[in-house]
Structures are given as C-alpha cells and as structure tokens.
Image (cartoon, helix red, strand yellow):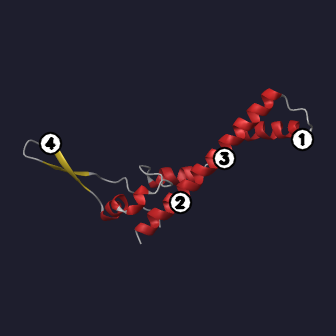
Amino acid sequence: MTVQYVTTVQYVTNEQGRQVGVLLDMALYRWLTSEQTTDPDLLIGMTTAELEALAESKLAPDVQEKISDLLAVQQADTLSAAQEVELDRLLSHIDQLTILKTRARYTLAQQQAMTR
C-alpha cells in the first residue's frame, strides 16, 4: 500500500482572510503526531514519491566505472596517493547513499505501518 501525503491542502481562515489553521488527513495527522517523528532515522518532510525514488536510486554509471577502474589499479598495487584519496571519497559516498536508501525504505515502512 502506498500512501501519498501531498494532496490538497485546506486552510482555515479568519474573518480577515488570514490563514490560521490547516486541515490534515487523519493518516498524515497520526504520522506527524506519533512518537516516531522523534526517530532520527526517519526522513521527515519527504513525499512518498520522493522516498520511493530515493530508495530505488542507483549509483551513476560513470561513478561506478571510476570506482571499478580505481579498484583495478588498487589490485595491481599501483594506486597513487591521489587515486587513493579519490577512491576513499567515492566509497564514502557509496556508504552515505546506502544509508540514505535504507532510511528511505525504513521511513516508507513506518508510514505504511501507521496507515494500517
């Protein structure tokens, strides 16, 4: 079940036409007011579509090719200091992407659990 939270927003206005409140879908309200919003691993503020796109994202082919090339040079034991720094930087980016993808999948699972 996919829940899309970005829908029509309805505002409550006062006599002067100023927005003084907002009406929320109950599922979104429960999600926003749950204790889970304090969970540091949740990616709050992203739409379901954004979370799904992030969860399914992949490393760019040119970056993957660069990593493969650097790993081949490393295996041949001819990696320069600059190449080693570049490889470490790229591998660190892969680690961060993996963490973000995992957090996106976790957030989606938590959203789905809240709407059951």
Q: Is residue 1 left or right of residue 90?
A: left
For residue 90, the mark is none
Residue 59 seen in render? no
- Crowd class of label 2 (few under 14; some 14 to 19; many from 20; radius 10 Å): some
Which tag is nearer the camera, tag 2 or tag 4? 2
Identity of the residue furthest to the bottom in this view: 116
Q: What is the number of callouts on the image?
A: 4
**Is residue 81 or residue 69 the one in the foreground?**
81
Residue that numbered label 4 is attached to: 18
How much space separates mark 3 and mark 4, taking CA atoms? 46 Å
Q: Position of residue 103 (x, y in %)?
A: 55, 54
Distance from Cα at disc 2 to Cα at disc 4: 37 Å
Q: Position of residue 4 (x, y in %)?
A: 41, 58
Mark 2 lies on residue? 106
Label 3: few (<14), some (14–19) or many (≥20) C-alpha neighbours in 10 Å = few
Residue lying at 68% horizontally and 41% vertically, measured from the top left: 92
Which residue position holds label 1?
A: 75
Dividing the picture into quadrants, the one containing residue 24 is bottom left
* Earlier sequence position, callout 2 versus callout 4: 4
Identified by mark 2, the residue type is Tyr
SS type, badge 2: helix
Residue tagged by mark 3?
A: 95
N-term-proximal mark, 3 vs 1: 1
